[in-house]
Image: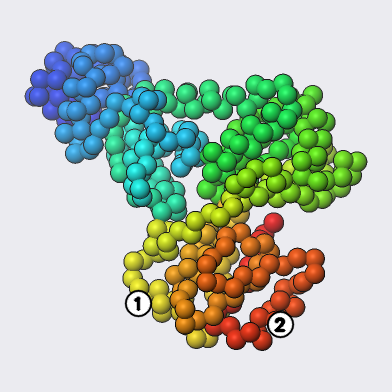
């Protein structure tokens, strides 16, 4: 027997399956070596599904669930991106407070588990691991993919663009990329720092789609050179828009900025729960801290959390930002506009007795 035989033996001992069932499963496994024994027993329907998953959980020391789409209480791939869902065979099916319940098809795959755990930790979530059958994971993924197809269903350009934007909001995307290609228009979302392809739109809709984006973002319709705009149609979001001319047409990037987004605790972001260490690191009389990272990796979230941690009545915190993305009570925040520069704002700030200064320019 191969390395999976001990589980088979345990299942026989517990009366879940017969020895003949294990032999049938092992023959099947020779033709499908990538399949695990428990999944094969389920696929071949050699024993009751509930008895099998409960016994496997007991043997492996794992929490278990027979996952169905009805068990998924989260919005599609809201917490981990679709590429990670497929490669790690993992589904976040429920989030309660700061605890995320995650189903895995293989709880022995430490690389997959660590990748998911780190993605959730960036969002201040602690992972609670569950085991399910691989076919359950595959069925939920198919359901997700069927929902994503609705992006391209509409023949109405206004409704199509609205669906693209609202779906991005539901999935917690930081950016939307609308990119003309040779034979289609590709739509991608940046979620947790990674670009995820979500739809391909017919090339015939390109002119109308570009016209609609420019119309709602106050851009010049005739101008095809790079320009900036903004969309203010959505009550909970400010959306900054930038265009760029490419050989296949105008590409657009929409940056989604949630209004009045709450500040996360610095400890929820994964910083060590050590007040003395954090004070020593951030609360210095003379120092400069530089925060740099790729788009969507949490620079702004980290900076605001650090300011919130340091904020107290006896110190004067001043920010100079382009733009102010989150308002923090008790902190003096300055926004750069056409009438001011970082140099002039910093000069004025230094005359106002600051204890801490934040300089933040969006990489946009």
Judging by the rendered image, the residue that carries numbered circle 1 is 276
What is the x, y in percent for residue 273?
34, 66
Tell me the residue that label 2 is attached to. 347
Residue 25 visible in this rendered orientation of the protein? yes
Q: Is residue 38 above or below residue 292?
A: above
Quadrant occupied by the C terminus: bottom right
Residue name at image x 71 percent, y 82 percent: 347
Nearest the eye: 161 or 250: 161
Do we see residue 114 in this rendering? Answer: no
Q: Residue at x 70, y 46 (%)?
A: 232
Which of the colour schemes (rainbow, by chain, secondary structure, one colour) is used?
Answer: rainbow
Q: Please tell me which residue lies in front, 211 or 326.
A: 326
Q: Position of residue 190 (x, y in %)?
A: 59, 44
Q: Residues within 10 Å of mark 2 (few under 14, many from 20)?
A: few
Q: From this view, report whether residue 297 is shown above or below residue 277.
A: above
**Considering only order in the chain, which callout, 2 or 1, is on the residue closer to the N terminus?**
1
């Amino acid at each position: 027997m191969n390395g999976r035989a001990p589980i088979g033996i345990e299942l026989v001992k517990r009366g879940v399956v017969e020895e003949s069932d294990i032999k049938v499963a092992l023959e099947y496994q020779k033709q499908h070596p990538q399949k695990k024994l428990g999944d094969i027993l389920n696929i071949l329907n050699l024993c009751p599904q509930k008895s099998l998953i409960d016994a496997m959980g007991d043997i492996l020391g794992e929490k278990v669930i027979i996952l169905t789409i009805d068990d998924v209480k989260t919005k599609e791939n809201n917490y981990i991106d679709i590429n990670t869902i497929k490669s790690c065979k993992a589904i976040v099916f429920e989030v309660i407070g700061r605890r995320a319940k995650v189903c895995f098809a293989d709880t022995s795959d430490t690389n997959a588990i660590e990748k998911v755990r780190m993605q959730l930790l960036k969002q201040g979530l602690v992972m609670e691991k569950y085991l399910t059958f691989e076919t359950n994971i595959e069925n939920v993924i198919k359901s997700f993919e069927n929902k994503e197809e609705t992006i391209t269903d509409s023949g109405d350009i206004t409704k199509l663009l609205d669906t693209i934007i609202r779906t991005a909001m539901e999935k917690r995307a930081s950016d939307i990329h609308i990119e003309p290609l040779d034979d289609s228009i590709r739509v991608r979302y940046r979620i947790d720092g990674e670009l995820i392809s979500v739809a391909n739109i017919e090339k015939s809709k390109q002119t109308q789609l570009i016209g609609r984006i420019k119309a709602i973002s106050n851009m010049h319709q005739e101008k095809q050179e790079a320009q900036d705009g903004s969309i203010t149609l959505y009550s909970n979001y400010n959306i900054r828009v930038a265009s760029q001319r490419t050989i296949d047409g105008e590409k657009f990037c929409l940056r989604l900025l949630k209004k009045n987004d709450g500040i996360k605790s610095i400890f929820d972001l994964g910083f060590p729960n050590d007040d003395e260490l954090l004070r020593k690191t951030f609360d210095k009389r003379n120092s400069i801290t530089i925060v740099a990272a790729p788009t969507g990796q949490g620079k702004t979230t980290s900076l605001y959390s650090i300011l919130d941690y340091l904020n107290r009545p006896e110190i004067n915190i001043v920010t100079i930002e382009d733009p102010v993305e989150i308002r923090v009570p008790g902190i003096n925040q300055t926004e750069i506009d056409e009438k001011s520069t970082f140099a002039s704002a910093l000069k004025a700030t230094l005359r106002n007795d600051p204890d801490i200064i934040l300089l933040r320019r969006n990489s946009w």
